[in-house]
Amino acid sequence: MSLLRRARLQVEHLLARRGAAVAAVLLVVGVLGLAAAGWIYTHPGTTRVAESSTALDVQAETHTSGLITGDNTVYPAGQRVQDRPVYFRASTSDFRFSAVATPQTAERGGEFTQRIAIRRTASRDGNVFYRDTRVLASASARNASVQTTASLDITAIENRTAALEQRIGDAGSVSERLVVSLSYQTPRYEGTKNATATIERGETWFDVATPTLSVTRDVTTTRVHASSPDWRAVAALGGAGALCVLVALLVAGLYWRRYRDAEPEPYREALVALVYREWISEGTAPSGAAERTVHMDSLVDLVDVAIDTDRRVVHDTDAGTYYVIDDAATYTYTPSRQPVDVSTGTA
């Protein structure tokens, strides 16, 4: 109970001294808390997210086809067959190799050029010392598919390769293959992609591989997304701010009604009396208790005298004076104003 009474006296002393300032500080803190909560709610912040998208995607396929002629054929005569695993020399004419490049995704203004060429190389121990490339067909398109078709005479190709092998002799090895190249040029990208197709031959048959190629270019963009408000911070700051404003209004009302004209000194002296209550007893000092009277400046000083002389402090509640009666002198302290009564739970 004494702790509560002491805390109450401390609060009342603070209100009597600085009640208006305390209310103002609480009001400012509360308003700042509410303003901070409002700022966090209305400015939740942003999150940067990197997103990858395909800016260029071109897919190219190759195909073979041949016209079947003659009576003794494996495939139906008079028809053009396509993408067969093998073609027969005796019954195949007008053999074609084609490539089709289709932009799946491309920037506007993109230009594509596709070429079909035959390349012969001669090498020794992995080192190429001869290379010959002859373009058989070429086509270009802008923002559209590109189809390129080349007619191949397998016998003529074989004879040219054989002639090169005869010239090279045992100095190295000769290889031949078809090369499909796709060149692209867009406002952002440019380059060339190649694919090779091998030519296999037998005495009565031949086969040309049908590779595929693709050109893809990805672009990364950063998007800014609004984040959700930090509801915990909003609730904490808003609640604390509202509570401070409410307490500020209560303190201001209490100060205006009870402590606006109050002097803080009686509350301070009452607090001192409560702290040293073990040394203070209520009573009436007898007249002429000592020939010598010493007036003390504060109740604390008087209690120090009582402690030093092993005496008690007598509080004359009628006169409002505190005494310490010693053989040599009577020590007194009289508050400038009537102190607050601390003997009960009310101030």
Image (cartoon, rainbow, N blue to C red):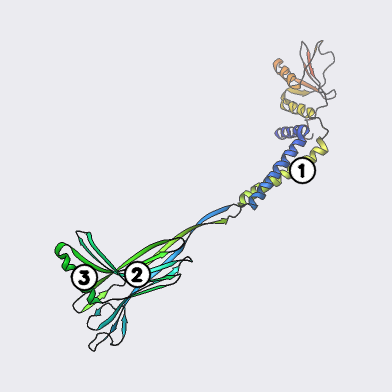
Relative to 92, 36 lies left or right: right
Calculate the distance from the C-alpha at mark 1 to the C-alpha at mark 2.
Answer: 86 Å
Upstream in the sequence, badge 1 or badge 2? 2
Q: Which residue is mark 1?
A: 249
Upstream in the sequence, badge 1 or badge 3? 3
Nearest the camera: 282 or 89? 89
Q: Which residue is mark 2?
A: 115
Within the image, what quadrant is residue 335 found in? top right
- Residue visible at 75% across and 23% down? 280
Q: Which residue is mark 3?
A: 161
Q: Secondary structure at mark 2?
A: strand
Relative to 254, 108 lies left or right: left
Q: Position of residue 252 (x, y in %)?
A: 78, 40
Within the image, what quadrant is residue 7 found in? top right
Q: Position of residue 206 (x, y in %)?
A: 23, 76
Relative to 236, 166 lies left or right: left
Quadrant of the drawing holding the C terminus: top right
Nearest the camera: 214 or 155? 155
Q: Amino acid at mark 1?
A: Leu
Q: Secondary structure at mark 1?
A: helix
- Residue visible at 74% across and 34% down? 11
